[in-house]
Amino acid sequence: MTGFEISGASAADMELIRRWADEEGWNPGDSDRFAFAVADPAGFLVGRVDGEPAACISAVRYGSDFGFIGFYIARPAFRGRGYGIRLWQAGMERLDGRLVGLDGVVDQQDNYRRSGFRSAWNNVRHEGVPRPNGSGGGAGGGAGGGAAFEVVDAASLPFALLAAYDRRFFPGPRDAFLSAWTGLPGRTALAAVRDGRIEGLGVVRPCSGASRIGPLYASTPAVAAALLHRLAEHTPDGAVAVDVPDANPSATALVAGLGLEPTFEAARMYTGPAPEVELAGMYGVTSLELG
């Protein structure tokens, strides 16, 4: 292991990590790194062999008791030489004492189980151009009794309301990340509002492949469908990708009904009991890299 050093990621390293993730077929957002960097500036690590970047990992802290592992990549030329496990250990040490989550690709899930992780559900990426349906794709598309909901620019709402809504679906505070995630140039964040209450939130961002939607939160399938259709209007060709938790059958049924096809799968795994979040309202997770 002579010549192997671990250090925090620089701005240039963050761009390199994004390219590595793209090469792995993960289709990260073009500007995700700018939001990731503010989530936990010290949470991204790079391992170098004689100065050459060889591996990376993110070990991001949220609040005082939660953390998330992502971007665990060893470059092909450096695999099988122990560099990756050294970096893994450094990342896990950074999150020591916390509940830790990750999204594990299929061929690595047994390794994560040996490290103490257990599966909670699967996030299944569905891609395609959503076909029209009867749930409405714009403002005012309501469902059931009561006032109709309205789809608005999320930036028009007090940020404190957005942050409080996000906490219903995520196990730790992440205000700085959420502010960047919803506000970066080139992406669109929409909220569904009914009687002054937020009933849905969705963000779409450009990627090298299909534009990624995440998060996608909604009180009903009709709200989720309206947000998804409106977000798809803000993509170059209408094609989107959304990582759907299979623990929410309504979400799986919705994207299947809209003609989106499963293309990728990862297991949401935790080192302890899965945190209590509103899975029934989670139609798409924010990010497979940072939760």
Image (cartoon, rainbow, N blue to C red):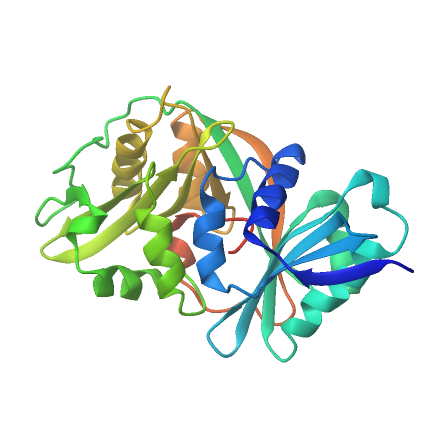
**Residue 160: x, y in percent?**
23, 65
Residue furthest out toward the top: 237
Residue 285 seen in the current view: no
Residue pictured at 30% horizontal, 34% vertical:
231
Q: Residue at x 59, y 76 (%)?
A: 98
Residue 164 is left or right of residue 48, and the answer is left
The answer to which image quadrant residue 161 occupies is bottom left
Which residue is painted at 25% across and 36% down in the image?
Answer: 226
- Indicate whether 276 appears above or below 13: below
Q: Is residue 139 left or right of residue 7?
A: left
Residue lying farthest front? 51
Q: Is residue 233 above or below residue 22?
A: above
Dividing the image into 4 quarters, which one contains the N terminus? bottom right
Q: Quadrant of residue 214?
A: top left
Tag count in the figure? 0
Nearest the viewer among 177 and 103 is 177
Q: Give the left or right position of residue 221, taking residue 5 as reference.
A: left
**Residue 197: x and y, percent?**
16, 58
Residue 119 percent location from the top left of the image: 64, 58
257 vs 11, nearest the viewer: 11
Residue 148: x %, y % from top left: 11, 44
Asked where in the image residue 263 lies, by quadrant, the reply is top right
Q: Could one spot residue 9 in this view of the protein?
A: yes
